[in-house]
Amino acid sequence: MNFPNIELFPYNTGISPNGNLSIGGCDVSDLAREHGTPLYILDEVTLREKCREFVNTFRDYYPNTRVVYASKAFINLALANLFNEEGLGLDVVSGGELAVAQKANFPSDMIYFHGNNKSADELSMAVDYNIHRVVIDNFHEMTLLDSIAKEKHIVQDVLLRVSPGIDPHTHVYTTTGVLDSKFGFSIQTGQALQAVEMARGLSNVRIVGLHFHLGSPVFELEPYTKAMEIVLNFAEESNLDISEISPGGGFAIAYTRDQTPPAVKEYAEAITSTLKGRDNLQLIIEPGRSIIGRSGIAIYSIGSSKDIPGIRKYVSVDGGMGDNIRPALYQAEYEAVIANKMGSDVAEKVSIAGKFCESGDILLRDVMFPLLEAGDILAIPAAGAYAPSMASNYNMVPRPAVVMVKDGKSRVIRRRETYDDMMIYDLV
């Protein structure tokens, strides 16, 4: 059977009576026929259980914890509603993500606005919506927000994003807490202290907490503990009276069988161990990938193939880097199964190529599968995060639909784009 570690898939994964892969009680091959491919499938039960796991586990270790979902992993109206129902806050990084929160009537006092280059319009939008915290990333933003808040006759509470100078040993493109980073005020260089002093001289911005983010995904625990200690020490040394601290997110998930990320309780223990005797501080964590990643799978239809004797066999699917840029951008690795051949033995080594006009559009390299035929359904697990959210219309290919499954039923939460959708903004 060509079924890799089931831990990569949503909780409600199984094999249907006819031998096909099933998610949330739905036959994946049936979903492909009903909704077309490429298709992203989210299991609602897994998604909600992941939310509750983070809330309950972190609060077991440190009751004064707030869990805030990192919207950049993937957000839309249906997901915003679900996270609100589960009691999570939202971390947004753009006016667009904030607009989703507004449209979903997400509680403004549960929203945190991140980003290294927020525009005046975005900051005004945040202030007008009375969001809970703006996370200040640089000197320009601090003075800009102060002037906007002054015009609106309010004092905006903010978190100061600092860089602790810790290397989490993840991909260079997703490492954010080191000295050489576009994000935050460096503690090592003295910029963080300068930012504190600047804020003290402003009348409409008030620092109430500190934020940092190491990167993502982070498979080690020690970087969190070290960074927390550095940031807490910085608060004391700068005589900064804070009521909130956030280590961000970055919690890892397994994409392949050989990856073993820490359990949520291990992250919780590592982070909260630094807060003993500091119960007055609210801890804010920002999981994104670790909540929605395992909840989702991507499915594709097999199309053409090209066999280069003695070199490699390429099998192409009807999606690729347009809906999942991670393999091309980060050299991300995945595993996959053939949803309509779960009982078949592996028979050939192939590389799965996307349909986009780039040689780098390869989703999987040198993977063993059953004999593949046009029309077979390829299913990739751990695809809920940073795939639909980073999708593009490269080559003028419409972005896929997203469906939510539960108890044998599916509902579309984002419809498939059409050619007309892609041309709606064109003018002649």
Image (spheres, rainbow, N blue to C red):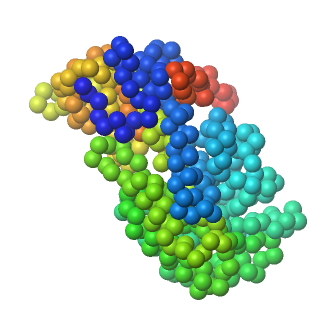
The residue lying at 54 percent from left, 74 percent from top is 276
Residue 341 position within the rendered picture, expressed as x and y whole percent measured from the top left: 30, 19
In the rendered view, tell whether residue 348 sits above or below residue 88.
above
Nearer to me, 94 or 236: 236
The residue lying at 51 percent from left, 20 percent from top is 408
Residue 272 position within the rendered picture, expressed as x and y whole percent measured from the top left: 51, 67
Residue 223 position within the rendered picture, expressed as x and y whole percent measured from the top left: 42, 68
Nearer to me, 381 or 365: 381
Q: Which of the 4 image quadrants contains residue 277?
A: bottom right
Nearer to me, 309 or 229: 229
In the rendered view, tell whether residue 64 sits above or below residue 20.
below
In the rendered view, tell whether residue 378 sits above or below residue 6.
above
The residue lying at 46 percent from left, 54 percent from top is 264
Q: Give the position of the N terminus as an image quadrant.
A: top left
Tell which residue pokes out farthest to the left in this image: 310
Q: Give the position of the C terminus as an image quadrant.
A: top right
The residue lying at 53 percent from left, 34 percent from top is 45
* Residue 102 in the figure: left or right of residue 306: right
